[in-house]
Amino acid sequence: MHKSYGGMGFKDLSAFNLAMLGKQGWKFQMDTESLVSRIFKARYFPNNSYLTATIGHNPSYVWRSILPARFIVRGGARWSIGSGNYIPILAEPWLLNGESIPGDIAGASFVRNMSINSLMDPTTKRWNEHVVREVFSEDLAAKVLNTPLYEQVQHDKLIWKAEKSGRYSVRSAYKLCVTESHLHVTGYWLGIWKLKVPPKIKNLMWRMCRGCLPTRVRLLDKGVQGPTQCVSCDSNHEDLNHIFFECPSAVQVWNMAGLWQSIRQAMAASPSVIDSIFSLLQSLSVTQSQRLAALFWSIWKRRNNKVWEDVTDNCATVVERARSMTEEWKIANIPVVPDQTAVSAGSVTAAAAAVPAGSVSAQVRWQPPASGRLKCNIDAAFSAHRNRTGIGICLRDEEGVFVLAKTVSDDGVYPVDIGEALGLNIALQWVSDMQLDNIHFEVDSKTTKEAIYAGREDVSKLGNIITASRTLLFSKFVSSRVEFVRRQANAVAHTLAGEATFLASPLLILLYPVILKL
Ligand SMILES: [Zn+2]
């Protein structure tokens, strides 16, 4: 069984998005007078703050997106204590190192609506030790008393502890998010990445398997008060297992789609729902997996239609929605590779496509890899103006269908050889992290390709990168190789690398951007 970190790849994208959303959350905290902050406050947290808000009644799409990013804001924020008037005692990061006092401590009700100024001596700006020891356990009291108060600080202010400037940055938030070790979960993640479905469906599967789909039971676990009943049946426990496997309305869908037998077997043989999903992805055919994933998505959509719109979709609607979603995706992803059988006389593109492999023209067009393999194109770009080196990496399958892409950038303009060699190194690392093999890596730097196979020991900076790449290639891959192509056949990676010079953070791309013109 393939094992790889569930965080890899998707984690990058998810973390990046959360870091971006966290920025808005941070603004709610900091920029309380802005119109946007005032609107959200009035609607969702009139009596508390973004950091302590709940999802609320009939939340908007935007609020539902911003709220989950709170853990990042919380994780990176710390109060700088001025008067203490605006800092609630409970559940706010004001203790030393940004710790907070849990909202459910014994005696919490006494201090529920109080600010920390009530723990301070109003004249000397010191903790009122007597009060602090009276209110908290010995342990907590020590933490409070160890939290420094500075005379010079006059206003209560949240600061972003991950940046020296104290200001939120997407880059540091992203780092905070990817270094969260709990994001690493083992499982057959490759099965999700390989699915031939739209990215939003892969994303749903990923959230399901990471256990972060906001089912009612999960929301309650996270402290969000609300009902836990299933919206389709009498069950009082709406969790992942119920929505997708136990609920009679789901079983009906699976039966109609001809997948119920497989699901029942997988469930009987697996210790958890998530293991059942992984095991299904391993045992089902490509088409069946595609149907399974699209139905997960459609079932979740039915649930949300009911919760947010009070619309009830019947079973046939759920199955049909999944079917048409996969059909539409298939049409939009018709391979654009040269296909000998499609050649018709007189067509310019068909004529180009018909050029036999090996001729000069064939070499300057991107060619799909052999059957069962993936092609990984890599390129580097350099921007003196932005003082950045960008790396673009793109994976496509034997039909020329886009699989995944990634961009990485680094500050500074590297020498061309170093940039190209670094690109290959990053690609080898990324692809081996995903435990993929049978990869046809393509670079448009002859130097890089030749150096990899030259076997020379070279202790220069370039030599070190090449040696590291060679080690990766020969230790992590059994049947993968690195080849040289001309620039014209490497246009997609080239475009991505150029785009990367605009970005300060790595980005994983699940859906091919329009700029790629695949
Ligand atoms: Zn139900």
Image (spheres, rainbow, N blue to C red):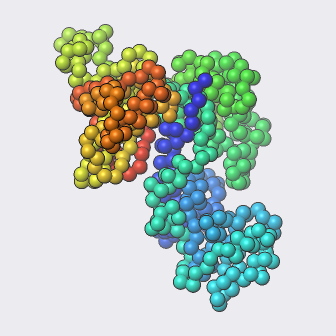
For image coordinates 23% across by 14% down, the residue present is 358
Q: Which one is nearer the viewer's eye here, 164 or 35?
A: 164
Please identify the quarter of the rendering in which residue 229 is found.
Answer: top right
Q: Nearer the viewer, residue 111 or 470?
A: 470
Residue 334 visible, this angle: no
Above or below, 433 relative to 63: above
Quadrant location of the N terminus in the rendered image: top right
Residue 352: give x, y in percent of width and height.
Answer: 21, 17
- From the viewer's perspective, tell me whether residue 411 is left or right of residue 281: left
Which quarter shows the C terminus?
A: top left
The percent position of residue 110, horizontal first and vertical second, equals 79, 73
Say left or right for 402 vs 265. left
- Out of 270 and 302, give the one closest to the viewer: 270
Residue at coordinates 61% horizontally, 34% vertically from top-left?
Answer: 186
The picture places residue 369, in percent across and down from the top left corner, at 36, 19
Indicate whether 175 appears above or below 231. below
Could you tell whether 349 is left or right of 3 in the image? left
Q: Relative to 254, is 24 above or below?
A: below
Residue at (64%, 89%) from the top-left corner?
124
